[in-house]
Image (cartoon, rainbow, N blue to C red):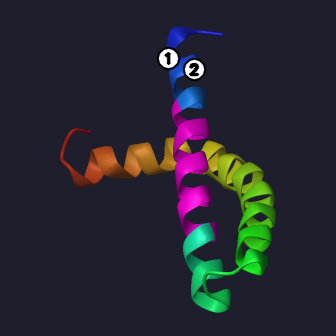
């Protein structure tokens, strides 16, 4: 695995983790309020959302990178 590939995978893992952690917590908090049930739902949502978020980020990274390069005039 090249250094660039490792960096892309690690970046995808960290970003999908942060986004899944925040959004699963935020939206379950809005739905349930600060309760014990909220914490359990947040943990469940995160465990489901992180792998899905990573898979999606991995699939969309190159197309979005190309699009960003074109939109910013670097292509």
Please say whether residue 16 is one of the residues in the magenta stretch.
yes
**Is the residue under label 2 in contact with that under label 1 (CB below 8 Å)?**
yes
Which disc is residue 4 wearing? Answer: 1
Q: Residue furthest top?
A: 2
Q: Nearer the viewer, residue 50 or 32?
A: 32
Q: Nearer the viewer, residue 5 or 26?
A: 26
In percent of width and height, residue 47 lies at 79, 55
In percent of width and height, residue 66 lies at 40, 44
Residues in magenta? 11-24
**Residue to which mark 2 is pinned:** 5
Quarter of the image holding residue 19? bottom right
Using the numbered discs, state the Cα–Cα distance from disc 1 to disc 2 in whole angstroms: 4 Å
Quarter of the image holding residue 10? top right
Q: Locate the N terminus by quadrant.
A: top right
Residue at x-position 67% and y-position 47%: 54
Q: Residue furthest left?
A: 73
């Amino acid at each position: 695995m090249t250094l660039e590939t490792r960096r892309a995978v690690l970046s995808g893992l960290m970003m999908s983790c942060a986004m899944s952690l925040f959004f699963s917590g935020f939206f379950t908090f809005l739905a349930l309020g600060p309760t014990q049930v909220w914490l359990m739902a947040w943990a469940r949502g995160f465990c489901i959302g992180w792998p899905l978020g990573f898979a999606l980020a991995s699939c969309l990274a190159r197309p979005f990178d190309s699009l960003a390069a074109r939109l910013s005039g670097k292509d």
